[in-house]
Image (cartoon, rainbow, N blue to C red):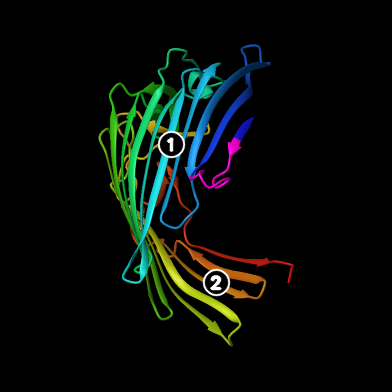
């Protein structure tokens, strides 16, 4: 239920105001020791408000706060704020934006309680996770450049950790998954550059992201992520739109989270002999066509397979497909 006064409803209303109250009922079913399904129900209630200015061309801002006062999530707090300033520079518009949030949230149900044939835990003593972020972005439309900087801090970060033994025949044994909380604060720095270049029919789109985590054993991240897409865009007979190009994804090597098949989630590697993945470019070559309402494409996925480097994994022990040819058609039946 919400009550809102819209921005501009009279000449004194320079921002919109909203107040709301919400209630959630969550239902879970898990198998018990007798082989039957056991039901779990949780109910939470929260209230909050928002102050937002979205009209106009120069300044926009929004502040939203919500707190929970009933149920398992009692004591949660979420505060989100955004602002952007737009001004002219050399005949185009520069956008400077900032955002911040403070979230104190309870770990999810499956962190606190889980029952299955292979995994079982009860964690009623988990602390609330505190996640705060400060972020700034700069967007200059004339040069198609966007910069982003962010600082995150996490306290009592909750995560899954997986441990197992790999036997001589490459099977696994003693597979366990546990819920852990980081006892110390985790700091994360992020810097990202998005740059698009256009020269006649030639287009080049790139995103480069640098990250640094203070606790890679708890929150593992690659130091560098790169995505780049180079293509030619032109028309044939003024009606057939064509794109011919190639894209590449690359990230530096790191101890990536492992996939837990028993849980259906990713978990941090807790075993002594951790597996590193990355430091491998994944390259695709494609051709896209559009004729009125019809779109069709042909794609050679992972064209660099067999180049000698066999480290093509996005998760430990789960290799990517090798070279594969794909094609497709999309047709919208309207004028």
Expressed as whole percent of the image width and height from the top left, the position of residue 307 reads 36, 62
For marks 2 and 1, the one nearer the N-term is 1
Expressed as whole percent of the image width and height from the top left, the position of residue 302 reads 45, 61
Q: Which residues are magenta?
A: 4-14
| Residue at x-position 50% and y-position 44% | 12
| Residue at x-position 31% and y-position 71% | 90
Whether residues under marks 2 and 1 lie with C-beta atoms below 8 angstroms apart, the answer is: no
For the image shown, how many numbered marks are present on the structure? 2
Q: Quadrant of residue 165?
A: top left
Query: What kind of element bears circle 2?
Result: strand
Q: Nearer the viewer, residue 241 or 168?
A: 241
| Residue at x-position 61% and y-position 82% | 239
Q: Which residue is mark 2?
A: 288
In the rendered image of this protein, does residue 327 appear above or below residue 152?
Answer: below
Q: Quadrant of the N terminus?
A: top right
Left/right placement of residue 310 relative to residue 259 reads left
Q: Is residue 11 magenta?
A: yes
Q: Quadrant of the C terminus?
A: bottom right
Q: Which residue is mark 1?
A: 80
Q: Nearer the viewer, residue 8 or 311?
A: 8
Q: Is residue 249 visible?
A: yes
Q: Residue furthest bottom?
A: 237
Q: Mark 2 Cα within 10 Å, few/some/many (few <14, many 20+)? A: some
Q: Quadrant of residue 303?
A: bottom left
Q: Is residue 167 visible?
A: no
In the rendered image of this protein, does residue 227 appear above or below residue 52?
Answer: below
Q: Residue furthest front?
A: 11
Q: What is the spatial separation of the Cα atoms under label 2 and label 1, in whole angstroms?
A: 40 Å
Query: What kind of element bears circle 1?
Result: strand
Left/right placement of residue 214 relative to residue 307 reads left
| Residue at x-position 59% and y-position 80% | 240
In the rendered image of this protein, does residue 104 appear above or below residue 240?
Answer: above
């Amino acid at each position: 239920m919400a009550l809102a006064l819209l921005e501009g409803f009279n000449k004194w209303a320079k921002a919109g105001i909203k107040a709301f109250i919400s209630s959630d009922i969550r239902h879970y079913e898990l198998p018990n020791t007798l082989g039957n399904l056991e039901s779990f129900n949780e109910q939470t209630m929260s209230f909050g408000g928002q102050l937002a200015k979205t009209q106009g061309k120069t300044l926009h801002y929004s502040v939203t706060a919500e707190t929970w006062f009933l149920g398992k999530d009692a004591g949660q707090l979420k505060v989100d704020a955004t602002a952007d300033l737009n001004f002219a520079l050399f005949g185009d518009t520069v956008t400077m934006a900032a955002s911040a949030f403070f979230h104190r949230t309870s770990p999810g149900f499956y962190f606190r309680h889980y029952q299955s044939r292979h995994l079982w835990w009860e964690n009623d003593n988990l602390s609330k996770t505190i996640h705060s972020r400060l972020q700034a972005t700069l967007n200059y439309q004339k040069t198609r450049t966007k910069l982003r900087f962010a600082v995150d801090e996490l306290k009592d970060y909750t995560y899954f950790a997986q441990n197992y033994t790999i036997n001589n025949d490459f099977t696994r044994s003693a597979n366990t998954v546990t819920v852990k909380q980081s006892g110390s604060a985790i700091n994360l720095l992020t810097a990202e550059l998005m740059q698009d270049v256009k020269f006649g029919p030639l287009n080049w789109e790139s995103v480069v992201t640098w990250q640094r985590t203070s606790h890679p054993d708890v929150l593992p991240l690659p130091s560098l992520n790169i995505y780049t897409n180079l293509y030619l865009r032109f028309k044939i007979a003024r009606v057939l739109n064509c794109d011919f190009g190639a894209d590449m994804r690359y990230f530096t090597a790191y101890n990536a989270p492992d996939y837990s098949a028993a849980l259906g989630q990713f978990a941090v590697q807790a075993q002594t002999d951790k597996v590193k993945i990355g430091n491998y470019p994944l390259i695709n070559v494609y051709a896209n066509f559009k004729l009125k309402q019809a779109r069709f494409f042909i794609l050679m996925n992972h064209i660099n397979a067999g180049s000698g480097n066999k480290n093509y994994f996005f998760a430990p022990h789960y290799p990517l497909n090798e070279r594969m040819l794909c094609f497709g058609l999309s047709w919208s039946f309207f004028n």
